Image: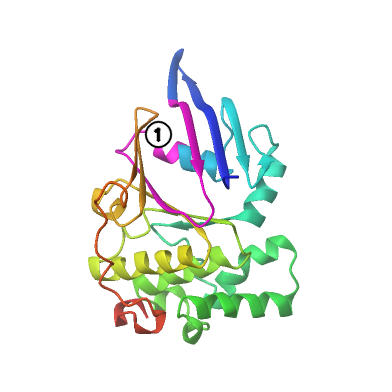
Amino acid sequence: MPLVELRNVSKVYHLGGEEIRALDDVTLDIETAEFISIIGPSGSGKSTLMHILGCLDSPSQGTILLDGVMIHNASSRELAAIRNRKIGFVFQFFNLLPKLNVLQNVELPMIYSGVGGKVRHERAMHALEQVGMANRAKHRPSQLSGGQQQRTAIARALVNNPRIIFADEPTGNLDSHTGEAILQLFRNLSQEGRTIILVTHDPEIAAVTPRRIEIRDGKVAEKVDIKLAGLDRAPIPTAGDITSLPDACR
């Protein structure tokens, strides 16, 4: 069974008497441990699709199963609980709280989950070790490079052991070398069994994922398995061992 199943999903907004179909009859399956990209220009519907897949919004019509659970008609409270247990988010601008240190930022999702202090600390440190940031646990965001802040954000997304991580333009605020290291980290997480969904408008970023879903005018315009299409790229020229990431990301 796919981890995520969308069937005939649409999202309709009504503005000033006009009907706007942000998503239009989308049918899609996403498997466990897939590393995929959702690509499309501004206004294409890719952000709406991410919001619905990420339980931030509900569709106007259609059905959605996430990990075997129907979520298309879930209440706001139920969606919030699903997000907390099964989904992690990474954003372009990191969204770290400046007054908290790295460890405290990573602990935040567990506070909302009611996890006790000792367990929070252990799980947060383990997540920071996964992304090579354990030695920066007491630093504040202002003391970190862009790559370090993004790796902290990834650790925060990992602490509740989510099935899916959504990365919305995660390299858009980074230089190309640091961005490649972050993409390699996502690839490693996928190989460990996480489902990674990368949302981008950049074809070069989308090309690093084994599967690409193109959204245009609210519809799935293209679903490409890059390996099957003979377009697989060489591995990103960054070591898979997180300890060997460039200094800009440490």
Q: In the displayed image of the protein, which residue is found farthest to the bottom?
A: 135
Of 188 and 243, nearer the camera is 188
Q: Is residue 104 left or right of residue 18?
A: right
Q: Residue at x 71, y 77 (%)?
A: 119
The quadrant holding residue 170 is: bottom left
Give yes or no for residue 243 being in the magenta stretch: no
Of 43 and 200, nearer the camera is 200
Give yes or no for residue 37 being in the magenta stretch: yes
Q: Is residue 122 above or below residue 207?
A: below
Residue that label 1 marks: 45
Q: Position of residue 24 (x, y in %)?
A: 44, 24
Total tally of numbered discs in the picture: 1
Q: Position of residue 5 (x, y in %)?
A: 56, 38
Q: Position of residue 64 (x, y in %)?
A: 60, 35
Q: Residue at x 31, y 60 (%)?
A: 173
Instruction: State the quadrant of the N terminus.
Output: top right
The quadrant holding residue 92 is: bottom left
Q: Judging from the image, what secondary structure is the residue with disc 1 in? A: loop
Q: Residue at x 32, y 39 (%)?
A: 40
Q: Amino acid at mark 1?
A: Gly
Q: Is residue 104 above or below residue 173?
A: below
Q: Residue at x 24, y 51 (%)?
A: 231
Q: Residues within 10 Å of mark 1 (few under 14, many from 20)?
A: many
Q: Position of residue 210 (x, y in %)?
A: 36, 54
The reply to whether residue 56 is visible in this rendering is: no
Q: Is residue 99 left or right of residue 188?
A: right
Q: How is the image coloured?
A: rainbow
Q: Which residues are magenta?
A: 22-48
